[in-house]
Image: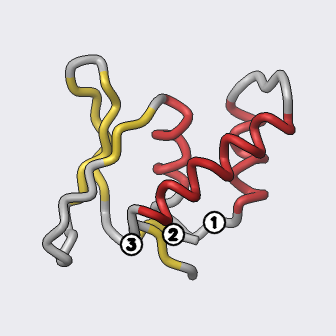
Amino acid sequence: MKLKYEYVINTVADQIVAVPINCQSGKQNIIKTNETGAFILELLKNSIEKQQIIEKICSEYKIASLDKLNLWVDSFIEKLQSADVLCDE
């Protein structure tokens, strides 16, 4: 999976946001997220599988529960799919 559009990720008023810069659908799919979500969005700039995302998060952050992380990543990916910003590659 990969992001359909190129995003710029910044912190605005203490909120992390990802803003599309080449979205041609006319929709502004601005994504509000946390630090981990921003990390995943950076990973999704290139084609990557869910298991690779999990591995990279585990190497970057201290993870208390792998099960909770899996559920959180699933939920985050589902939200991105619902917003129609992911493509399969």
Assign a secondary structure to mark 3. Answer: loop
Identify which amino acid the numbered label 3 is placed on.
Lys
Q: What is the x, y in percent for residue 40?
A: 55, 47
- Which numbered disc covers residue 48? 1
* Residue in the image at 21% along x and 70% along y: 23
Residues tagged 1 and 2 counted as in contact (Cβ below 8 A): yes
* Residue in the image at 75% along x and 47% along y: 54
Q: Quadrant of the N terminus?
A: bottom right
Residue under label 3 = 4
Identify which amino acid the numbered label 2 is placed on.
Lys
Mark 1 or mark 3: name the one nearer the start of the chain: 3
Q: What is the x, y in percent for residue 16?
A: 34, 31
Assign a secondary structure to mark 1. Answer: loop
Crowdedness near tag 2: few (<14), some (14–19) or many (≥20) residues, C-alpha within 10 Å = some
Q: What is the x, y in percent for residue 8?
A: 27, 49
Res 11 quadrant in image: top left
Q: Compute the Cα span from label 1 to label 2.
A: 7 Å
Q: Quadrant of the C terminus?
A: bottom right
* Residue in the image at 19% along x and 66% along y: 27
Nearer the viewer's eye, disc 1 or disc 3? 3
Q: Is residue 29 left or right of residue 38?
A: left
Res 85 quadrant in image: bottom left
Residue under label 2 = 2
